[in-house]
Image (cartoon, rainbow, N blue to C red):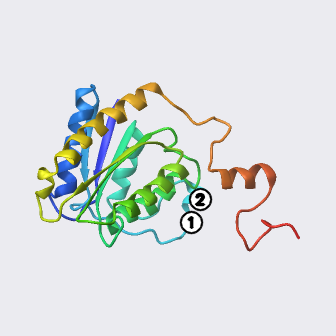
């Protein structure tokens, strides 16, 4: 059992990383092997929309994301962590979400992995992060756990948020327990519904094509 924690903060040792370390410690209490992955020290480039991954199943951009793909595929559970920037996830988090298209366009390779989320905001904004990752987990056919949120602004302040600290540790345990129970999507639905309908019924999701009846 392996749990990967991805800290999508541009700040080294920030509040998100504090909570992620708590979550991974919780996973370890259930016997999981864990790995902390930080993004502040990585060279990651945005998706350029070339769509070549739809044919090859691989992203052509040569940067540190190429080393992240195998880690995503090897993990049984993936915890995403991001501070709130302008009422949503950081740009670094969004880049990784966009680049994950290479694991989705050709075949859903994150299916049945357990996904968790930790967000840290100064006041508002956590809900925007939740909405983004709800969509991410759904499209990838991942199994979503509870979300954890903390309140902090200055570096290290989240240590004072007793609820967030405890909830993060419980999230790590929850990730492992859900993964062990092996809840799974039906094999018949190997792609997202909109792709399934196009493949099985020949009806495109695009509004500019044949979605609507004449």
Residue ID at (56%, 66%): 51
Q: In terms of depth relative to the viewer, which is nearer, 83 or 72?
A: 83
The residues tagged by marks 1 and 2 sit, at their Cα atoms, a distance apart of: 6 Å
Residue identified by numbered label 2: 54
Position of residue 121 in the picture relative to residue 180 (left or right): left
Residue 87 in which image quadrant: bottom left
Position of residue 210 in the picture relative to residue 106 (left or right): right
Check if mark 1's residue and mark 2's residue have beta carbons within 8 Å: yes
Task: Classify mark 2: helix, strand or loop.
Answer: helix
Q: Position of residue 18 (x, y in %)?
A: 17, 50
Task: Classify mark 1: helix, strand or loop.
Answer: loop
User: Does 130 sit above or below residue 44?
Assistant: above
Residue 34 in which image quadrant: top left
Residue 10: numbered disc:
none
Residue identified by numbered label 1: 51
Q: In terms of depth relative to the viewer, which is nearer, 52 or 198?
A: 198
Q: Quadrant of the N terminus?
A: top left
User: Does 44 sit above or below residue 104?
Assistant: below
Q: In terms of depth relative to the viewer, which is nearer, 10 or 105?
A: 10
Mark 1 Cα shell of 10 Å, populated few (<14), some (14-19), many (≥20) = some
């Amino acid at each position: 059992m392996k749990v990967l924690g991805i800290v999508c903060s541009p700040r080294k040792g920030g509040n998100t990383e504090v909570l992620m370390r708590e979550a991974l410690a919780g996973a370890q209490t259930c016997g999981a092997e864990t790995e902390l992955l930080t993004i502040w020290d990585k060279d990651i480039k945005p998706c350029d929309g070339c769509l070549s991954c739809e044919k090859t199943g691989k992203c052509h951009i040569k940067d540190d994301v190429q080393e992240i793909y195998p880690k995503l595929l090897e993990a049984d559970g993936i915890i995403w962590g991001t501070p709130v920037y302008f009422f949503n996830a950081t740009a670094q988090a969004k880049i990784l979400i966009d680049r994950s298209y290479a694991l989705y366009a050709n075949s859903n390779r994150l299916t049945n992995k357990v996904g968790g989320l930790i967000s840290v905001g100064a006041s508002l904004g956590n809900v925007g992060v939740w909405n983004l990752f709800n969509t991410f987990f759904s499209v990838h056919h991942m199994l979503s756990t509870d979300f954890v949120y903390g309140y902090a602004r200055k570096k290290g302040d989240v240590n004072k948020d007793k609820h967030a600290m405890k909830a993060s540790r419980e999230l790590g345990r929850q990730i492992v327990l859900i993964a062990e129970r092996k809840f799974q999507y039906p094999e018949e639905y190997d792609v997202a519904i909109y792709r399934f309908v196009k493949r099985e019924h020949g009806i495109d999701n695009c509004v500019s094509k044949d979605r609507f009846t004449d």
